[in-house]
Amino acid sequence: MATVELSKISVIGLNDHKPQILKGLMDLGVVEINNQDGKLTDEEWSPLVEKDGDEVTVNSLDTKISEASNALDALNKYDKGKKPFIKVRKPMKESEFEAKLKNRDVIEETVADVNGIYKQITRLKNEENKINTAIIGLKPWVQYDLPLDMTGTRFTSIVIGTVPATAVVEDVERAVSEKSQGAVVYKVSSDEQQSYLSVVCLNEEKDEVLDVLRLNNFTPIAFNEVSGKANENIVKFEKELEEIKKNILNLEEQLSQMAVNRADVEMLHDDYIIDRDKAKILSNIVKTKTAFYFDGWLPKAKEDDVKKVLEENGCFYDFKTPEKGEEAPVFLKQNAIVEPFEAITNLYSVPSVNDIDPTPFLAPFYFIFFGMMLSDTGYGIILAVGCFILLNRFRLEGMLKKLVKLFMFCGISTAFWGVMFGGYFGDFIPVAAKTLFNKDIVVNAVWFNPIQEPMTLLVFSLILGAIHLFVGMGLKAYILIKDGRPVDALCDIFLWYVLLIGLVLFGIGESVGLASVGKYMSIVGAVGILLTAGREKKSIIGKLLGGLGSLYGITGYLSDVLSYSRLLALGLATGVISQVINTLGSMAGGGIGGAIVMLIAFVIGHTFNLAINVLGTFVHSSRLQYVEFFGKFFEGGGVAFNPFNKKTKYVEIIKEEK
């Protein structure tokens, strides 16, 4: 299968050689080092060893990584150069990488300068926001003739504030005058939210006047940080804003010019990551005063490469084959055709050590289902060619590369089924020919048109679904036999094959003379399940009830098969929406105007239809794998093999042969 065989490795070495050993293993990138916390609580180990590691160094490097990342964010924000459509790692030879980092001090100074400038920009923008907020607060008081910080005279008090716009100012004036005939309420301005008032009263009446104002929802305002009139302060603040904007532009220009150093900062960032990971992996190691120990996993085929590193550094090591059922990571490796479909498996779960890798088995079904659901030659060509260009234009890696390659393959399937079903951007060719050139062009399907013959597609979909489910059941039987349980495979899988195939033959076999064969197969399968499904029960009644319960599960198989009717539903949805778009485009008739309208409808409509149906097709094709197919045999819950290597973000360091 596609699961790579792993070996368990145990290593003891001298502390003096530890840096060289870890560097060698990191360069190889094929060994996963296990956490050794269990040794610290083990009665035999705990008196002899202690946990290795240097949290101070790890935290320090994490801080440096964060600083470098912040500097890169700042440089990217103000870089005026052309940015790549997709950001990928830049390949670089190890010697070149190390040579460029000889100027580490200079690059670190650049990081510090960039972060310092960006902090200044942030501070100035905060001041700018603060001043703008102050100006907004001052504008309603432009018509106020008194200084805003003036709170009264020797005999009078002045209070400014607001009341809600729903309040009637005349009513407020009346309420105040009833309390104090000498008090004056002056409306300075108003907006949709509130009215701005100034109230003058005698000092001895201030408290009583304020009580009346509060009853009318009056909110006092105090301008503690300004002095003088509102318009004077606005003029002053606007001058400050101009100066701040000039300073911000100057600092942003400095960052823009420093963007040429981005590649150096990216290398420094990745070098910090490498150093951090080296320091961090120490926490997975236990040590004494002179020696250290760790164990882990590696591909069996890489044992000789690892031996060479360990022997060069005088280590004691041991390779073992994992015992049956032992918890181990899972390392999947597919051929070039199947590898993209591994993305579908990993989006669900990594296989456990007891599973078989489902990817080679789901790949052909996913390929077929996706194409049938989208089923348009034009859409398929766009999807396949677009993904092909991305794969050849950019150095994609990991999950992104798998998904893009997956969609390229699925685009090929979509184009194939589009030819079989006669879909070329729906019915665009005959509609455009009739509308623009008054020509009747018929594009026939190689097989049939699903919109005209939906029942044919439904039957074909259900047949594909039954095959898909039978493959899943067969994989379950294989797992049972491999685990030494052939009786379970016979009773729980083979008898269901007999029953289900028998029912199909009984239902449709009359025309070919197989109905009687189907009847007897159904009886044999049903009786066999009835007698064996409850075999683990102790009493006869329990065994029969278990068999009856298992037979009731036939309704589950029926619902599983019906789930594949979504192949029909999604296929029709793509075709019908395409026809609607083409019909809308033809409504303006012929001529130049009609051609323009049709072109606009074609580009906008089919772009939308392609995007929405690719998403729906991806989801529903995956669902058929996860629910119907995986439900028959796949458990998942495994842990992916995670070797100790250089997990850089911006630079792909290429190891050179010495």
Image: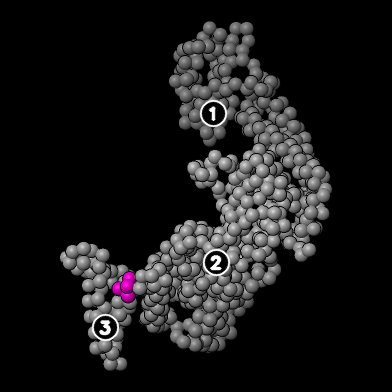
| 2 vs 3, front mark | 2
How far apart marks 1 and 3 lie (CA) works out to: 89 Å
Q: Quadrant of residue 8?
A: bottom right
Q: Quadrant of residue 133?
A: top right
User: Where residue 249 sits: x, y (%)?
Assistant: 77, 42
Q: Residue at position x 54%, y 25% from top?
A: 162
What's the residue type where badge 3 is placed? Met
338 displayed left or right of 249 = left
> What is the crowding at mark 1: few (fewer than 14 residues within 10 Å), some, or many (at least 20)?
many
Q: Residue at position x 47%, y 15% from top?
A: 211
Residue placed under numbered mark 1 in the picture: 195
In this rendering, the answer to whether 21 lies above or below 323 is: above
Q: Which mark is residue 5?
A: 2
Report the quarter where the C terminus lies: bottom right
Q: Residue at position x 56%, y 49% from top?
A: 35
Give the residues drawn in magenta, as a range.
487-491
User: Where residue 102 sits: x, y (%)?
Assistant: 82, 49
Q: Work out whether residue 589 can be spotted.
A: no
In this rendering, the answer to whether 281 lies above or below 171 is: below
Q: Nearer the viewer, residue 302 or 556?
A: 302
What's the residue type where badge 2 is placed? Glu
> What is the crowding at mark 3: few (fewer than 14 residues within 10 Å), some, or many (at least 20)?
many
50 displayed left or right of 571 = right
SS at mark 3?
Answer: helix
Q: Earlier in the sequence, mark 1 or mark 3?
A: 1
Q: Nearer the viewer, residue 82 or 491?
A: 491
Q: Which mark is residue 521?
A: 3
How far apart marks 2 and 3 lie (CA) works out to: 41 Å
How far apart marks 1 and 2 lie (CA) works out to: 78 Å
In this rendering, the answer to whether 68 lies above or below 432 is: above
Q: Earlier in the sequence, mark 1 or mark 2?
A: 2
